């Protein structure tokens, strides 16, 4: 099943160059005020959304990347939880959003199937008014993140 995350270029470069997830992710401690996930403190995790529009709860700024992963449904079902995010319209209310916390040990480079560079800041009004997200992103072939790529 396809899932989505917002990330920085360095994360994509690390995955492509090292052909692993060894240098990405973070360790998390359980925090029921932020989410419902159960974490192993010795493992690093990446978080994903099932709905691509949920990335709007994060800062969709120019220069960031939307990474698309294809992950087994069984893995996603075992790691499903909810996260609490501020309303991206008024920032006053907390919304409970379905998300997945996957240990980087369970991810393989082939799970990363597409990367889109955000070329224009995306605001909630853009999506609300019906602008297609394709207007704000540019698909980047994964090979462009190889060691040979000039910065």
Image (cartoon, rainbow, N blue to C red):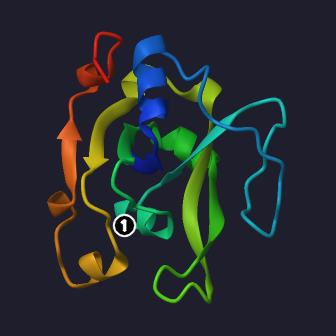
Q: Secondary structure at mark 1?
A: helix
Q: Position of residue 150 (x, y in %)?
A: 28, 18
Residue indicated by mark 1: 53
Q: Residue at x 83, y 48 (%)?
A: 29
Image quarter (top left, top right, bottom left or bottom right) of the C terminus: top left
Image quarter (top left, top right, bottom left or bottom right) of the N terminus: top left
Asked if residue 14 is positioned above or below residue 67 in the image, the reply reads above
Which corner quadrant of the image does residue 111 belong to? top left
Which corner quadrant of the image does residue 35 belong to? bottom right
Tell me, yes or no, if residue 1 can be seen here: no
Q: Position of residue 95 (x, y in %)?
A: 59, 79
Left or right, 18 with respect to 41, comes to: left
Left or right, 45 with respect to 108, comes to: right
Q: Residue furthest front?
A: 151
Asked if residue 15 is positioned above or below residue 139 in the image, the reply reads above
Q: Residue at x 51, y 17 (%)?
A: 20
Q: Position of residue 99 (x, y in %)?
A: 56, 58
Q: Residue at x 39, y 59 (%)?
A: 61
């Amino acid at each position: 099943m396809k899932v989505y995350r917002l990330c920085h270029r360095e994360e994509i470069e690390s995955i492509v160059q090292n052909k692993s997830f060894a240098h990405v992710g973070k360790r998390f401690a359980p925090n029921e005020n932020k989410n419902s996930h159960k974490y192993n403190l010795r493992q690093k995790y990446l978080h994903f959304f099932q709905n691509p529009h949920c990335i709007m709860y994060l800062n969709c700024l120019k220069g960031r990347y939307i990474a698309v992963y294809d992950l087994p449904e069984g893995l996603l079902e075992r790691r499903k939880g909810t996260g609490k995010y501020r309303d991206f319209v008024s920032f006053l209310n907390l919304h409970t959003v379905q998300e997945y916390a996957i240990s980087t040990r369970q991810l393989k480079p082939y799970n990363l199937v597409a990367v889109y560079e955000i070329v224009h800041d995306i605001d909630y009004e853009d999506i609300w008014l019906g602008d297609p997200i394709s207007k704000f992103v540019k698909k980047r072939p994964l090979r462009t993140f190889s060691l040979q790529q000039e910065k």
